[in-house]
Image (cartoon, coloured by chain):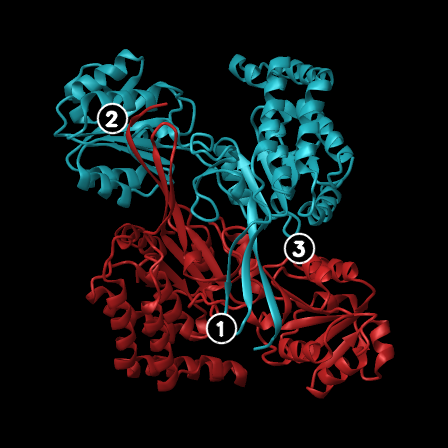
Chain colours: A cyan, B red
Amino acid sequence: MESLIEIAQKARQASYKLEGCRVKNEALLAMADALVKRQDEILSANDSDLKNAENNSMKKSMLDRLRLTPERIAAMADGVRKVAELPDPIGEVKRMWKRPNGLRIGEKRVPLGVIAIIYESRPNVTADAAALCLKTSNSVILRGGSEAINSNVAIMRVMREAAYAAGVPEGSLNILEDTSRQTATELMRLGGYVDVLIPRGGKGLIKSVVENATVPVIETAAGNCHVYVEKSADRKMAEDIVINAKVSRPSVCNACETLLIDSGYPYAAELLDALYQNGVEIRGCDRTRKLRPYVLEASEEDWYTEYNDYIISVKIVDSIDDAISHINNYNTKHSEAIVTNDYEKSQHFLDDVDAAAVYVNASTRFTDGFEFGFGAEIGISTQKIHARGPMGLEALTSTKYIIYGDGQIR
Amino acid sequence: MESLIEIAQKARQASYKLEGCRVKNEALLAMADALVKRQDEILSANDSDLKNAENNSMKKSMLDRLRLTPERIAAMADGVRKVAELPDPIGEVKRMWKRPNGLRIGEKRVPLGVIAIIYESRPNVTADAAALCLKTSNSVILRGGSEAINSNVAIMRVMREAAYAAGVPEGSLNILEDTSRQTATELMRLGGYVDVLIPRGGKGLIKSVVENATVPVIETAAGNCHVYVEKSADRKMAEDIVINAKVSRPSVCNACETLLIDSGYPYAAELLDALYQNGVEIRGCDRTRKLRPYVLEASEEDWYTEYNDYIISVKIVDSIDDAISHINNYNTKHSEAIVTNDYEKSQHFLDDVDAAAVYVNASTRFTDGFEFGFGAEIGISTQKIHARGPMGLEALTSTKYIIYGDGQIR
């Protein structure tokens, strides 16, 4: 087995050749075909993972996430084909200008170089991440969770062999077979080899990366999202948006976790009923509890909590400023929405709420690379540098100034 | 004295009001005036720093960097006035598009929030950093070196009082009076309060920040820059560029540290002579040493070294690929130049050299925010995420998606 440093060195060398690689899309199509053609190999590796997981008494819902089927492999391959169809961002000169001394300075979109991704989710992330990094001419070093290691390694082997056969520089597509915590920490500290590290997973993983990484990180974190129903809100629109934001898929990061209702909104109790009838547990402030007997008591902790479940916290607020200051205090800077028909308040909310995506009269559930029209999604950044919100292909690129002179000195 | 956490909390609160602040330019002009009007206060604080420095036997060149004069304060004030004149990047909607479901999604330029800057240079950085952060609606927490602490605190006091009197939110402009290493480390780990940390200083500082920081960092690092004289290079142009890149100001990060000469270039010895006559110590590879007796022997270490002095390492290479692979192996991804009259080679160099700024037929010394026409410079980023190369005002901004709906749900 190659050491991490050997893998990283080869990935770095390959990254220099990748920018000029002209067979990326052909390779992606070949990789997709290979996934389908060699599915037995992948399914048999997945079987080992499933057996280990059963022996370790993994929860049923987790087992289902881990399980691959011919249909799921076909969907994975389709995802890779879709990446091939996307426009290539690399090489675009975003702008070019001339200085008084005659220098022409261009800002060119280039790959980041070597991207490391640490993830703990479904095996399809392996295919997805490999495809997106290749599309953007980056070398990639993946480190998935131990529970899916056999599936991940098989998927990468199949894709890599197809890619290299199609002319992609060898060494550019990698997965760590060693899933020890020590190797993960080593990967986080590979300055000079890794240009950016993207963690995809739960709070524990993100925290470990933030604490330990010395290479630049793009944080993709939790979503404690709010919907604020302002008093002028249309009753049906407010109900539709709140129910959609909470109930359509409670486990995802763009789901609503806290509902703020203006004290002047006339249909607060009916809004609570709608949530309750949809099977949502409601934890409210004192004023909310007076509206309906089924409202449980919210603790201070609740305002910070991303339930990822059929639970919502509800607070009655007296003004938009109270709503905004609650949001800025408790949110995770992900997605926030106001439902209103008041022009001035809509602008105020858009201006003053600190989050990656701020909505007027729409569900927070739209914070997603595909819904935004990016054609891909690497994750949703909740930090402010480099990329904020849903990350498409551009988030996997950097820029380089290219300067044309004719002998200028300073 | 306020604790760091109190300062940070107030800075965070102030940052929410800063985005809508409409008196930024008036405040900047008032800050500039105050620097001049209250210069005696600043000069007397500077006197204390100078006395302490003399007692600590500071080097004369360092003493000169530390010393303030009425002229230097006037220049500092002029710098602040120039920042007032720059266009305000905040609030610009970079692009806005409509989705098939009718959602209108805009990408708006917003402040980062709270910026921390750790620096160890001249007191003028205090004025400069405060002005640039205010211009971009960011709160700032500065942490300067202990040797200039009295000057830095006086400059900040004068500027802050003028800014707050002009209506800038209180708590937005801060400098740490405590210059202990412990407090610096605390600042590097203030997740949730500090949105980005920018270190400006020598290798030791950068290394400490990269090792210790848990908040996002923009690395502004060393410049091990190369000039490659390709065989078709014009003799005079090559000499002008090499001399300018090495000799015009050897102490700066965009100065040339290694010269690569193509083995087919006919005037290699004469180029060495020009450097030698300009007082430059030359450390060369074996082939370089055969050209002139005054060439000293370069060690492997030399290829990695940023001399910041009248010293250059020189290597004869047999091809542009050798030159590029030497550069990508030893450089710090800062600035690299080729002198050539060969079209294909100029393109090859621009494409394959991995650096923030890649030049054809111009001196590396142009890598600078002002020379690029940005009107300001925060520093030169040598990392690939968020900002690369000279950073102007835009590097101090983030983006936020603002989404206009009419009841969309998913």
In the rendering, which numbered label is found on residue A100? 1
Location of mark 3 (residue): B351
Q: Give the camera-side residue of B62 and A317.
A: A317
- The earlier-in-sequence mark between 1 and 2 is 1
| Image depth: mark 1 or mark 2 in front | 1
Type of amino acid at the residue the image marks with label 2: Val
| Structural crowding at the residue carrying mark 2, measured as other residues with C-alpha within 10 Å and reported as few (<14), some (14–19) or many (≥20) | many
Q: Give the camera-side residue of A207 and A341.
A: A341
B87 sits to left or right of B169: right
Q: Chain of mark 3?
A: B
What is the quadrant of the C terminus of chain B in the image? Answer: top left
Q: Is residue B229 visible?
A: yes
A43 sits to left or right of A366: right
| Residue B125 figure quarter | bottom left
> Distance between the Cα atoms at labels 2 and 3?
55 Å
| Structural crowding at the residue carrying mark 3, measured as other residues with C-alpha within 10 Å and reported as few (<14), some (14–19) or many (≥20) | some
Q: Is residue A150 visible?
A: no
Element on which disc 3 rests: helix
Residue at 55% in and 59% down: A106
